[in-house]
Amino acid sequence: MAQNIRFAPSPTGFLHEGHLLSALYVWAVANIGGYKVHLRIEDHDQSRARPEYIQAIYDDLRWFGFEWESQSIQSERSCAYEKALQLLEKNKLTYACDCSRKSLLLENPCNSEGEVIYQGRCLNKNLEASPFTSIRLKVPTKTVYWSDLRLGAFCESPAAQCGDFTLKDRQAQWTYQFAVCVDDIEENIGMVVRGEDLRSSTARQILLMKLLGRNEPPHYFHHPLLYDPSSLLKLSKRQQSESLRAQKEKGKTAEELLGRTCFSRQLIRKEEPISLKSAILLFSKQIERYF
């Protein structure tokens, strides 16, 4: 049975050129490794997700010509997440936490990326789960050894990186770390291609997947990011990077945007229009040495 590779945007804004870059890496790796592309809409954060952004993802990808074999939406998978959580609860690997966002920042150290390293304040309180609590994973003190196809080998301890992380937040929303692990298991994801800003999540996700029953994790390829030349910040919705559809409305063609992305990766000598098929082949040739 062929394994899947996922493209997993969040519908919290319109797609921008950073998403286009990531999509080209995903489809290129699928081309190299014979994976089937699965489109996953990661709308676990219901406070920011919008239906119009979901439809825009489909429309924008089809405008470029991307095709995928299957798709899913996280907001429709609550039963799967509940089942996975019950497994962890049965194995006594979770606990309720009533720490507020303010107390988390005041009472815990942060890692180099500004993420809280939870010190286990609620670990032994035996709190009852309620609308005022989150659910945390009891992260075992284990070292995770894993390898990125591009970046090499890593040896990391999730307990030291982030401590006991949240599976379900105080708003009863599934967290990214939890939902993505359940999805990767059930959707037969054999290869994860994503930006290198998410590399630090890998060890804890491998650990969590093992606790959920998947002993062999996916392969990983973390690609370089696109940065705004004016601010030197990565392109993102939070930075209000110009969307692909905004550029389309200004008259840019899909081929022009593909050409600009290829030029940014030094795959072509000058910025010029290029077809999606040619762009995927260029990305494939650039990264095939890693496979």
Image (cartoon, rainbow, N blue to C red):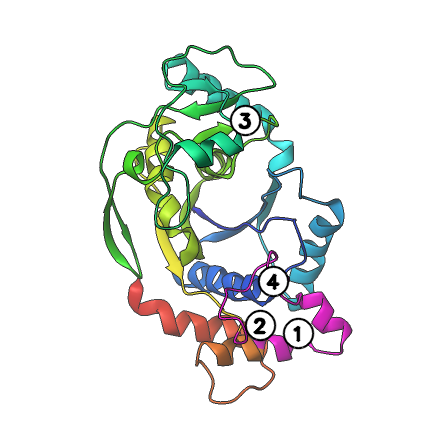
Label 3: which residue?
80
Proximity of marks 3 and 2: CB atoms separated by less than 8 Å: no
Residue 243 visible somewhere in the drawing = yes
Q: Distance from label 1 to label 2 (Cα)?
A: 8 Å
Residue 134, percent across and down?
A: 52, 24
Please name the residue shown 72% across and 55% down the image.
56
Which residue is denoted by mark 1 in the rendering?
254
Screen quadrant of the N terminus: top left
The residue tagged 2 is 276
Give the structural element (helix, strand or loop) at label 3.
Answer: helix
- Give the distance between the C-alpha atoms of the residues marked 4 and 1, in whole angstroms: 11 Å
Label 4 Cα neighbours within 10 Å, binned few <14 / some 14-19 / many ≥20: some
Distance between mark 3 and mark 2 Cα atoms: 35 Å
Q: Which tag, 3 or 1, sits closer to the chain's start?
A: 3
Indicate which disc residue 140 carries. none
Instruction: State if disc 2 and disc 4 touch (CB < 8 Å).
Output: yes
Crowding near pointer 1: few (<14 within 10 Å), some, many (20+)? many
Circles 1 and 2 in contact, beta carbons < 8 Å: yes
- Disc 4 element: loop
Q: Which mark is residue 66?
A: 4
